[in-house]
Image (cartoon, grey):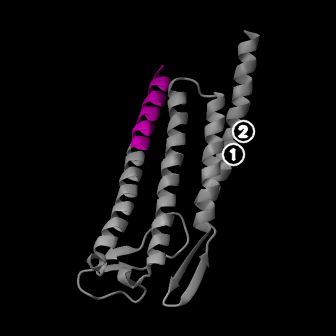
Amino acid sequence: MLCQMIQNRVIKIALKISKLILGICVLAGVAFVGFVIHWHMSPKSYEAVEVSQVFKPGFGVNGFHWVLGKKASAQGLWLSDLSPLMIYWLLLRGLIFIVLSFLITQAFQRILVSIHSIETFHQNNVKQFKIIAQYGLIAFFFSFFNFSYIQGEFDINFHLATAPLLLTISSYVLAEVFREGNKLSEDQKLMI
């Protein structure tokens, strides 16, 4: 009984955290789109934004810094120096990661809800793990490379993004575990 209470509390906490992550994803997506709209209306507002590592491969977007004064670091350049093509690429890439994070969290949340309602080895959980694995493959693809085209120079970078790859592999493994659990559960129901 105590074990089940602790388990339910852990699942409830995980559900609350997943809702928080979903909210953060929505806010980040709105912020990204708002940034592009505002950038179109007032590009001079972003002259003090330095970009340093936004063209590195990997999952996510980082490397935007608001700089007080006009002093860029040795590795950075100003957002205003980027072509619209590069800004759109950064936006698209960022939105892809935000949407993938949202979809993965949503699928994970569905699994938690079914576990909480004591339908752990339901066939739908197998499907959700396979969906997570597919999203993980897409995340791996977009994490594997990044490119930049700045002042006539084209640069492409590659990186073995292990986190999305491990997510994909572990999701496929869990899908198989839950599929076997589903088979055992169905066999047990037939015996009774």
> In the displayed structure, would residue 181 be above or below residue 146?
above
Task: Give the secondary structure at mark 2.
Answer: helix
Task: Give x and y (percent) for residue 170.
Answer: 65, 48
Q: Name the residue at 40% across, 56% down.
A: 29
Mark 2, Cα crowd under 10 Å, few <14 / some 14-19 / many 20+, is: some
Viewer-side residue, 84 vs 104: 84
Q: Residues in magenta?
A: 1-19
Which residue corresponds to mark 2? Answer: 176
Magenta stretch containing residue 60, yes or no? no
Q: Please give the name of the residue rendered at 27% of the width and 88% of the height, measured from the top-left corner.
A: 70
Quadrant including the C terminus: top right
User: What residue is disc 1 on?
Assistant: 172
In the rendering, at what x and y percent does residue 1 appear?
A: 48, 19
- In the displayed structure, would residue 20 be above or below residue 126? below
> Mark on residue 182?
none
As shown in the figure, which amino acid type bears the numbered disc 2? Glu
